Amino acid sequence: MKKLVNILRTEHHLDNSGYKALLESDDHEIITYLHEQAHEVAIEMFGKGIFVRGLVELTNVCRNDCYYCGIRKSNSNVKRYILSTEQVLHSCQQGYNLGFRTFVLQGGELPQEKASWLVDLVSEIRQRWSDCAITLSLGEWPWEVYERLRQAGADRYLLRHESHNAEHYSKLHPTKMSLANRLQCLMWLKELGYQVGTGIMVGSPWQSLNNIVEDIEFIENFEPEMIGLGPFVPQHDTPLGNHPAGSADLTCKLYSIFRLMFPNALIPSTTALNSISPNGRILGIMAGANVVMPNLSPNEYRANYALYDGKAITNAEAAEGIKQLEAQLATIGYHINWSRGDYNQC
Ligand code: 5AD
């Protein structure tokens, strides 16, 4: 088994049975070895600096109805909001003053007629902070909208594929959504020159280890710049609210596998991991993750952006929150890397 890890480190690839064997293994020694190798590679590539991205949760309005997500259209218990342009710019300004050089605008899928507002918002951010990267995480849009957003100055786009198995995908999403369209969107984003992130929820309902192997294969071929993985966490108002949460251990295993596969990928230690595991953020970094995404959204809206139950609310918009993050990283000899942190820029 250690040999498999060594092969993955040197050749950045295993065959399906190799991935499956690693995913199945509960041998503590092997798992520790996997994490150590991945951690070593991350340090080789990035040193002990962790990139930070300032997350602005733009809106919880969503035209979509994903069965796992707390802000799905059919959830009538959500108090809906769309931040105003001024609120978004204010959040970015606060983030900029603290040192953030990447802003991530994340939100539900707004109605089509809001596209122009999004384009104008991106233009405004681009003009005000020309030295910052703009990442979008706004779901599925037509090519034309992705193109306008890119021209307005967006650099990166996060769109998890969620599952590369069409049958599994259809169990997590309503029929009007399709894996084919999700993959089409990902291809468009790449063609438009975005740095693209994709990924899955680990332990989503009905996900088998074979499904995860399919996801690994897809990601291997797609070669995203960013890989976003967090455990599935149930949200009580959703159709999948009674399913158990995914495993932190499996999530960390996947961080390590992807680190060995793509040494220079940007892999966040996600809020979802930190929400189900007390020291999740650090465990993720020790497994090979190299990014964290503190929240810059205005405090009064945070509780309404509840994709899942028990979402960790970190307070990084305040200087105090950054100090805490720095202190937490310092416990493992790490620090914040305040640069834009583009792909390949190590
Ligand atoms: N548990 C974990 N992650 C979730 N997401 C949405 N709902 C949940 C949930 N219940 C993730 C999806 C989406 C990202 C923005 O949040 O993977 O792509």
Image: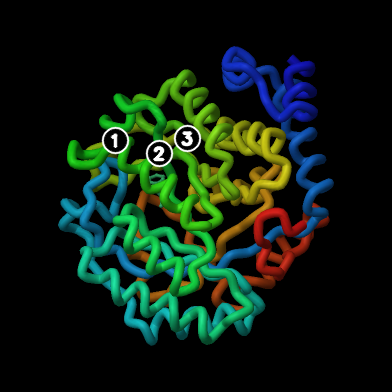
Question: Which color mode does the image show?
Answer: rainbow
Q: Residue at x 41, y 50 (%)?
A: 188
Q: Amino acid at mark 3?
A: Val
Amino acid type, residue under disc 2 in the picture? Glu
Question: For the residue carrying disc 1, how many other residues have a C-alpha within 10 Å: few (<14), some (14-19), or many (20+)?
Answer: many
User: Does label 3 or label 2 sit earlier along the sequence?
Assistant: 2
Asked whether residue 320 is in view, the answer is: no
Residue 151: x %, y % from top left: 45, 70
Callout 3–callout 1 Cβ contact below 8 Å = no
Among the two numbered marks 3 and 1 on one chain, the one whose residue lies closer to the N terminus: 1
Q: Secondary structure at mark 2?
A: loop
Q: Where is residue 169? Give x, y as percent.
A: 32, 32
Q: Nearer the viewer, residue 74 or 62?
A: 62
Provide the residue designation for mark 2.
162
The residue wearing badge 1 is 172
- Between 51 and 270, which is closer to the camera in this rendering? 51
| Label 3 sits on residue | 202
Q: Tell me the distance, in whole angstroms, between the alpha carbons under discs 3 and 1.
A: 13 Å
Q: Which amino acid lies under the numbered mark 1 shown in the image of this protein?
A: Leu
Q: Residues within 10 Å of mark 3 (few under 14, many from 20)?
A: many
